[in-house]
Image (tube, rainbow, N blue to C red):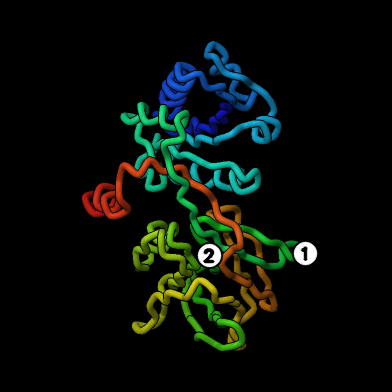
Amino acid sequence: MNILLIPNLNKKNAEGCTRLVCMELYRLGVTVMLDRRYQERFGSLPICFGGFYELLSQCDIIIAIGGDGTIIHCAKHAIESRKPLLGINAGRLGFLAKIEQSDLSLLSRLISGDYTLDKRMLLEVTAPVSGETVRQYALNDAVISNGGLARLSDLDVFSGEKLVGTYRADGLIFATPTGSTAYSLSAGGPIVDPSINCITMTPVCPHSLSSRSIIFNENKDLKVAAAACQEEIQMFLSVDGNTPCVLSKRDSVFIKKADITVDLIDFNNKEFYEVISDKIMMRG
């Protein structure tokens, strides 16, 4: 078995965790793979170094070592290569991580196949970028905003051809169930069990006491466009926290459930509600 490690060494505990993971996998007879840019730091360990995309094509499993942001970043590679992804928490919250550093003995279950694949819903987000229509996939969310400017924006939201409403706010968050515990939650959105496929829309700082989150059926095709009353102000689209792209007033963003999923390795050692209690409720 070949396993590709993708560590985020900006995390305080990630380097030490990577070393422990490497040695545990080596003990289990696994070929551990790592991008050659880490060779100077980990060259003394039993690791196969090489070009990242070559290793990505050769691996059987991807392991992300870091926080939630690291796991979301690695999900892009997992989607692209159609490989399962396991997150190991070396950050603070690590909501998407299935293993803590104290649980590395669970790695033996990768060898025996004693795990399940948690197929997480993705959003397919289509919008104009630099004059071309670009499709992106979101594990967490797609955010349409004014880029932090101290001005409200007026946005029309359509479901199919029907107007859902016009929202005056700093922006709108469209979240997957996975993303319901991220930015959407901070903006007052609901926590959604990831086994329920749906799209949650949450206004950011709405200029109305009646503006609340809406949960759409997974089969809804949504469109967001600047309202007719909207002044000429730049809007921005950010997918899973990536660098925002600039939208013009005439641009529309289309959001729907993607036809593909990302497969997260799960050892079923904790229920979703236990994770909520451990990582959110008890820290509030």
**Quarter residue 47 falls in:** top right
List the residue tagged with mark 1. 132
* Amino acid, disc 1: Glu
Would you place residue 243 above or below residue 113 in this image? Answer: below
Would you place residue 72 above or below residue 2 in this image? Answer: below
Instruction: State the residue at coordinates (54%, 36%).
Output: 62
Horizontal side, residue 272 vs residue 238: left or right? left
Horizontal side, residue 8 vs residue 99: left or right? right
Percent of width and height locating residue 26:
49, 18
Q: CA distance from mark 2 to mark 1?
A: 19 Å
Callout 1: SS: strand
* Amino acid, disc 2: Val
> Seen from this angle, which residue lies furthest left?
282
Instruction: State the residue at coordinates (54%, 59%).
Output: 122
Percent of width and height locating residue 15:
45, 25
| Disc sitting over residue 143 in the figure | 2
Percent of width and height locating residue 262:
54, 51
Quadrant housing the C terminus: bottom left
How packed mark 2 is, by other alpha carbons closer than 10 Å (few <14, some 14-19, many 20 or more), is many
Horizontal side, residue 16 vs residue 56: left or right? left
Instruction: State the residue at coordinates (41%, 29%).
Output: 107
Callout 2: SS: strand
Q: Nearer the viewer, residue 180 or 86?
A: 86
The numbered mark, 2 or 1, whose residue comes first in the sequence reads: 1
Are discs 2 and 1 less than 8 Å apart at CB? no
Instruction: State the residue at coordinates (45%, 37%).
Output: 66
Percent of width and height locating residue 43:
57, 14
| Disc sitting over residue 8 in the figure | none
Q: How many numbered marks are there? A: 2
Quadrant housing the N terminus: top right
Q: Nearer the viewer, residue 194 or 115?
A: 115
